[in-house]
Amino acid sequence: AHALKRHFITRKPIFGEPTVVRAVDGVDIAVGEGETFAIVGESGCGKSTLARLLVRLIEPSEGQVSYRGQDIGALSDKELRNLRAELQFIFQDPFSSLNPRMTVGALIEEPLRTHGIGTADERRADVARILTRVGLRPEHADRYPHEFSGGQRQRIGIARALVTRPKVLIGDEPVSALDVSIQAQVINILEDLKDEFGLTLIVIAHDLAVIRHMSDRVAVMYLGKIVEVGPTDALFEAPAHPYTEALLEAIPIPSVGARKARVAVDGDPPNPIAPPSGCRFHTRCPYTAPKCRTDEPALRDMGNGRVAACHFIGDLALKGIQPDAVRR
Ligand code: SF4
Ligand code: MG
């Protein structure tokens, strides 16, 4: 993804004027083939919007997404349909994404039919095979989604996404609606299938624990921007960006609602939709310095595949430094 932006216009009369929500605001990421890449951030940070932009479920306002060197925004409808067989999506809530009036077999077969793959017999065989692969049984094909538990429904969602043998699978919070005990099972299935199918996996999560053991690299998003990217182990061991540090240490950082109140007290522009000036994290960062309020930090290369957007990276190791020592 290059310089990707997605701005929504909301007509909700918050301040009487239509408002621009910069859900994704200039994101550059490159995901390698066969990689498991996680995008992490609080709800409302734009990660779901980013995921949908990556597969062109929604169109960007600016910027482009390339898949194997090809700009997917320039594809014809037919080319885009073919691409859809290669880039599949699984959703947070498998129930709302599964038509309740279709049998499980028909639901899983649907993408094959859409893409004109196989004869009716071959499709039935494919459905039976993929059901077994996700830990269900071929005879489950005759049942309806409501007859299954949440974890089983997510397995059905995975079967439906994988039946076309895609190369890339994007999961938007694929396990966050499930009980913790079921989450591990679904993650294990995803990991097994990733190896078997040679998938590139992009996983969106708000919970760092979920992606710690499955992802190769992590991108941390804050208010529509990527603030840090790095190999998972390195990033967990020594987060570079104060926001990542806060997410990892579960430092109670003020909620978005609380931030609004504080912004008003500090006399900043009274528009919660406009991101803060300078570093977007400055209203919540324990290390904020005057420069942070005016200058936006660019993503800087720290070596070893790590980048982060903070004025003080490279100048000081934020870890171990008292926040007050930085505040000037
Ligand atoms: Fe915090 Fe300043 Fe770094 Fe932003 S640039 S993360 S406000 S120290
Ligand atoms: Mg979301």
Image (tube, rainbow, N blue to C red):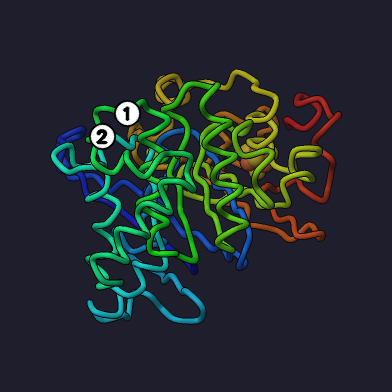
Q: Position of residue 28 (x, y in %)?
A: 54, 63
For label 1, the residue is 148
Q: Position of residue 230 (x, y in %)?
A: 71, 52
What amino acid is at disc 2? Pro
Residue 316 pos. (x, y %): 84, 43
Number of other residues with Cα within 10 Å of mark 1, as a class: few under 14, some 14 to 19, many 20 or more: some
Report the residue at 23% width, 66% height from top: 120
Q: Is residue 231 left or right of residue 10?
A: right
139 on left or right of 252:
left
The secondary element bearing badge 1 is classed as: loop
Q: Nearer the viewer, residue 148 or 17?
A: 148
Q: Quadrant of the C terminus?
A: top right
User: In which image quadrant can residue 287 be found?
Assistant: top right
Q: Residue at x 76, y 24 (%)?
A: 324
Image marks 2 and 1: residues in contact by CB distance under 8 Å: yes
- What residue did someone put label 2 on? 145
Callout 2: helix, strand or loop?
helix
